[in-house]
Amino acid sequence: MNSKAVATPTRTKEILSTYGFSFKKSLGQNFIVDVNILKNIIKHAQIDKEAGAIEIGPGIGALTEQLAQYADKVVAFEIDQRLLPILDETLSVYENVEVINQDILKADVKRVIEETFKPGQRIKIAANLPYYITTPILMKLLMDHLPVESITVMIQKEVADRMAAVPNTKSYGSLSIAVQYYTQAQVAMSVPKTVFMPQPNVDSSVLHLQMRTEPPVDVADEAFFFDLVKASFGQRRKTLMNNLVRHFNGKMEKVEIQECLDKVGIDPKRRGESLSIEEFATLANHLYTR
Ligand code: SAM
């Protein structure tokens, strides 16, 4: 066993040169070369020896190795076949790791969970995500309604800020509502570019998403609610009323929209970015059942 962690500049360089591995920018390959950052991710993910862990994009095994040491069992989805022989070597001493060579966006994660972990086991997702598909991956994981407790991921700072944003801020938008409908979102820490090889062009943060057992608001029709939220942020500088008139495009008269807004006590001159998730839910339910 090599006593030096994978997530060190010397060991990572050594592994890359032994295998003649060249980074694929198109797959968002920026590997972590700092063990402290990884230990922090594990701490924020609250991973312990009882927990099962799912990783997306193990790369050469920097985070996977740490997860194997702290968790009961680890499953990692990696799209790049060239990394499989490397992972075979770097993770050879760990008997509690399984690597699945699959695109996470196409994976049946629920089935993998059923087949891999013990019934009722606490499961955590932890990853340094490929930045080019951060949002699709997270939305897929949320929409799949997986039996996991939390998702802790390193992502682009700007996207983490948007997902955890509160009303009346620049970052607040339909993505904040979509994520916060399913989770309690919190930016856990910021991460400097220097811990990556190669260094990315953007700043990074670790985002912690604690899954909710119930949505924070009662919504009569989820598709109608999410469409309304998206439309309300459609043209950010326009009033809520203008965006709603545009959204319903004659399917609902302006007076009807005005009546609903009056009924729920929301000033039509407000901007979408000032509405809380509760206000969006109340408005959507009134418009839906008018
Ligand atoms: N976990 C490693 C680390 O922290 O050093 C690597 C992280 S790197 C930012 C992202 C990893 O995700 C790469 O290994 C890349 O090949 C993999 N990846 C990219 N797209 C993927 C997809 N659709 N499904 C699964 N893995 C993917």
Image (cartoon, rainbow, N blue to C red):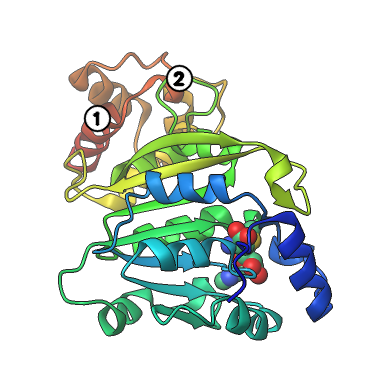
In terms of depth relative to the viewer, which is nearer, 36 or 220?
36
Question: Helix, strand, or loop for circle 2?
Answer: loop
| Residue 200 rendering spot, x and y as whole percentages | 75, 47
Q: Is residue 36 left or right of residue 258?
A: right
Q: Quadrant of ligand 1?
A: bottom right
Ligand 1 is within 8 Å of the C-beta of the residue at disc 1: no
Instruction: Note whether 70 is above or below 157 in the view shown.
Output: below
- Using the rendered view, name the quadrant where residue 274 is placed: top left
- Using the rendered view, name the quadrant where residue 18 is placed: bottom right
Quadrant into which the C terminus falls:
top left
Instruction: Note whether 169 is above or below 93 in the view shown.
Output: above
Q: Is residue 246 left or right of residue 119?
A: right
| Residue 122 rendering spot, x and y as whole percentages | 23, 62
- Using the rendered view, name the quadrant where residue 202 is placed: top right
Q: Is residue 142 left or right of residue 29?
A: left
User: Which residue has dot 1 on it?
Assistant: 278
Q: Residue at x 47, y 29 (%)?
A: 172
| Residue 121 rendering spot, x and y as whole percentages | 20, 68
> What is the three-letter code of the residue carrying label 2?
Arg
Instruction: Note whether 74 is above or below 232 in the view shown.
Output: below
Question: Looking at the image, how many numbered discs can be counted on the residues?
Answer: 2
Q: Residue at x 67, y 53 (%)?
A: 33
